[in-house]
């Protein structure tokens, strides 16, 4: 990083000694606010690949990733058992309706978060991403990411906006991590929407996680009503009553009973 002078020193770092305009990259106490964000991002990335490293530091507490999980198997016995106990429902979406979704974020330059303010802005959610399973696919994904990063660095101008570049690299790396799972989960055939937010998300909270004793933050994605294509009624009890309730719900909330296909599971599952 080049030597800094003037206002840049206030933003990116402080003088180590009188008259010396260099940053101490190994001393977070000597870093300015923007550079501290980069330091936090680097520490978070290190924690992803090395469990001995500290977990995500508080300086980066708002820059999180959120995922919505889907499957390409609409009537899977394993998923009825694992996620719904047989009595649930599988909602089928039109993929093209999931390509350009957004979530609201808050820029801290507007001051403290104000949920009622009109200064929230929308950032795009990724198109549906296929989850890769096993070490072989993991190595391919990491190799592709490394090649893309090397190309970006080699083709960049002499002066690179260091903070923006570091945060972009961190975000890209975290996206990759969110699309990799152990081979044991392969039968789920999972796809994900990923919302990576360098600012504060408009969060809600629900109970659950870590033995159902924790608090789970989540952010809401608004999608058009025509995104819902099909509802599969799980292979549980009272299927006719459950179908009636589903059709009433669709009509009440404006989805249209004739625009959404309602079908029953063909899995012979019973409690």
Image (spheres, rainbow, N blue to C red):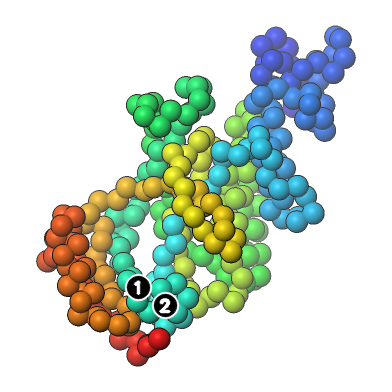
Residue plotted at (37% across, 48% down): 221
213 sits left or right of 244 in the view: right
Residue plotted at (35% across, 87% down): 267
Secondary element under disc 2, as helix, strand or loop, is loop
Q: Residues within 10 Å of mark 2 (few under 14, many from 20)?
A: some
Q: Residues within 10 Å of mark 1 (few under 14, many from 20)?
A: some
Residue plotted at (17% across, 72% down): 244
167 sits left or right of 6 in the view: left
Residue 159 appears in the rendering? no
242 over 116 or under it: above or below: below
Q: Nearer the viewer, residue 147 or 161?
A: 161
| Quadrant including the N terminus | top right
Residue plotted at (51% across, 41% down): 197
Q: Which residue is mark 2?
A: 85
Residue 138 appears in the rendering? yes
Indicate the quadrant where residue 77 lies.
Answer: bottom left
Secondary element under disc 1, as helix, strand or loop, is loop
Q: Of the numbered discs in the image, which one, if any, rests on residue 14? A: none
Q: Name the spot of residue 264 as percent of width and height, x first.
A: 25, 80
Indicate the quadrant where residue 166 lies.
Answer: top right
Q: Nearer the viewer, residue 3 or 44?
A: 44
| Whether label 2 touches label 1, CB < 8 Å | yes
Q: Which residue is mark 1?
A: 88
Q: CA distance from mark 2 to mark 1?
A: 7 Å
Indicate the quadrant where residue 50 lies.
Answer: bottom right
| Quadrant including the C terminus | bottom left
Q: Name the spot of residue 140 as percent of width and height, x first.
A: 62, 64
Q: Nearer the viewer, residue 158 or 258?
A: 258
Q: Name the spot of residue 270 as percent of width and height, x first.
A: 37, 88
156 over 243 or under it: above or below: above
């Amino acid at each position: 990083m080049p030597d800094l002078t003037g206002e840049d020193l206030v933003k990116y770092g402080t003088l180590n000694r009188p008259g010396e305009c260099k940053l101490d990259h190994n001393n977070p106490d000597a870093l300015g606010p923007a550079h501290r964000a980069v330091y936090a991002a680097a520490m978070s990335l290190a924690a992803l690949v090395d469990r001995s490293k500290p977990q995500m530091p508080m300086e980066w507490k708002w820059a999180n990733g959120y995922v919505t999980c889907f499957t390409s198997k609409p009537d899977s016995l394993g998923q009825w058992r694992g996620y719904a106990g047989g009595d649930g429902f599988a909602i089928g979406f039109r993929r093209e309706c999931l390509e350009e979704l957004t979530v609201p974020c808050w820029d801290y330059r507007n001051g403290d978060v104000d949920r009622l303010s009109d200064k929230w802005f929308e950032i795009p959610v990724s198109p549906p991403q296929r989850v890769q399973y096993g070490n072989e696919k993991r190595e391919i994904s990491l190799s592709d990411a490394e090649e893309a990063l090397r190309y970006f660095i080699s083709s960049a101008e002499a002066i690179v906006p260091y903070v923006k570049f570091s945060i972009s690299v961190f975000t890209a790396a975290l996206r990759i991590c969110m699309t990799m799972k152990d081979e044991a989960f392969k039968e789920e055939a999972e796809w994900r929407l990923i919302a990576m937010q360098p600012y504060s998300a408009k969060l809600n909270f629900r109970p659950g996680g870590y033995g159902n004793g924790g608090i789970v933050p989540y952010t809401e994605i608004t999608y058009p009503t025509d995104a819902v294509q099909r509802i599969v009624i799980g292979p549980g009890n009272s299927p006719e009553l459950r179908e009636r309730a589903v059709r009433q719900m669709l009509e009440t909330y404006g989805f249209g009973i004739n625009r959404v296909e309602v079908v029953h599971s063909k899995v012979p599952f019973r409690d």
